[in-house]
Image: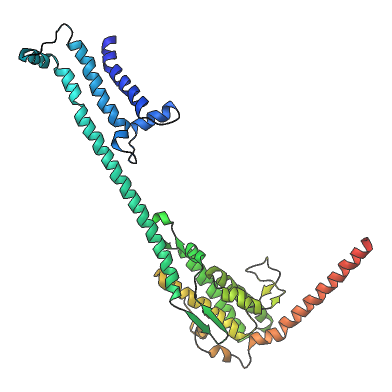
Amino acid sequence: MAQIIALILLPLVVAFGLTLALVSKGGNFFERTRFILTPHPELGLMKQGLLWLVILSPILYFLGTGYLAWQGYDVLLNAEGFQMFLQISVLPLALLSLAIPLSVLISRLHSTEQSAKQIEIVSHKNNLDTYRSHRQELFSYFGQIGETEYLSCIKVNFKVHPRLHTNFFLGSPMEGLPSPNEAAFKDIESELSTAQWGIDATLRDVNKPMTLSFYLNACSAIFRLSEKLGIPEIYIELAEKGVLVPAKIKKQPELESILTVGTTTDELMAAYRIARSFYLNLCDFACITPSMDTPDDRKYIDIGGRYSTVNDYLSVERLHETVIKSAVEKSGKLHNKAFKTDSQHLAISV
């Protein structure tokens, strides 16, 4: 029984040991064993541990079974000797012949793994090219628009901030063609609706005590739009022309003061139309149909010059000349008073 077990296991163990010593790689026994038993498409066929294992094993089984089969026989180099050799070596030769089909099998498996690896590499490269092409097409698309002037008060050069593609399109370079981020698009539409409603309420100036709040909400929404869409002409140029009003709004309660979009009705309208136009172009590129439903009584905000004749006066200018001016002056006096008080305390303590 022991001889049978040895005959079955010993050649395989010896073949494994020789393969482990010749072609394996790794820092310890387990890593080297895993290297032998795993196909490596990045390496040549001659460096595959499985190939050497299936070659050495049949040879050792041939020698082991042959040793038992050839006992009691002498070497005779003639026809009768060869005939006798074939008769007594059926099993050893059958085991030896397994080396050929097993080697072919390993070769096929190695070739298959290499093909799969090549397909994976090509697919990865195609995905990278597709993603980068989509990103580049976005920049190129907006680059075709060129410089545009709005309401004779601000010029916009439609250039896309690189972060815009990441924010409005989902996916990674490894996944290929990105898909539109619907949540980001919906957020922009919500901000546009907030700005539009605030502008309409400001221009109509029906509820005068609340008009400043409507105006500041619209300004805040427009600045948020400009930052999310990456329009520096709004959040830099018009911000520099604006006035910091000491007030709070519900949308951003953490702010102690709100910056106005310029100081005129034209600048407010131009900023809104720039953001809206930018968003519509982005939707066109992304093949998304905007779901903004503008009421008929507010369509004058999107196009045309009727916004300047809603009232006999311009409400934005009225706010800056009265309420905003008074609030800023009052805030300045309070600031100076607080500064003097702090200085007195400091002098006393010293």
Decide if residue 123 is in sight here.
Answer: yes
Front-lying residue, 30 or 107:
107
- Figure quadrant of the N terminus: top left
- Figure quadrant of the C terminus: bottom right
Residue 142 falls in which quadrant of the image? bottom left
* Residue 244 rendering spot, x and y as whole percentages: 70, 75
* Residue 46 rendering spot, x and y as whole percentages: 29, 34
* Residue 121 rendering spot, x and y as whole percentages: 35, 50
Give above or below for 305 relative to 47. below
Colour treatment of the image: rainbow
Question: In percent of the image, x 64 and y 87: which residue is there?
Answer: 315
> Seen from this angle, which residue lies furthest top?
72
Front-lying residue, 302 or 50:
50
Give above or below for 95 relative to 284. above
Front-lying residue, 84 or 209:
84
> Seen from this angle, which residue lies furthest front?
77
Question: In percent of the image, x 68 and y 87: which residue is there?
Answer: 318
Give the total number of marks visible in the rendering: 0
* Residue 127 rendering spot, x and y as whole percentages: 37, 56
Left or right, residue 210 beside residue 84? right
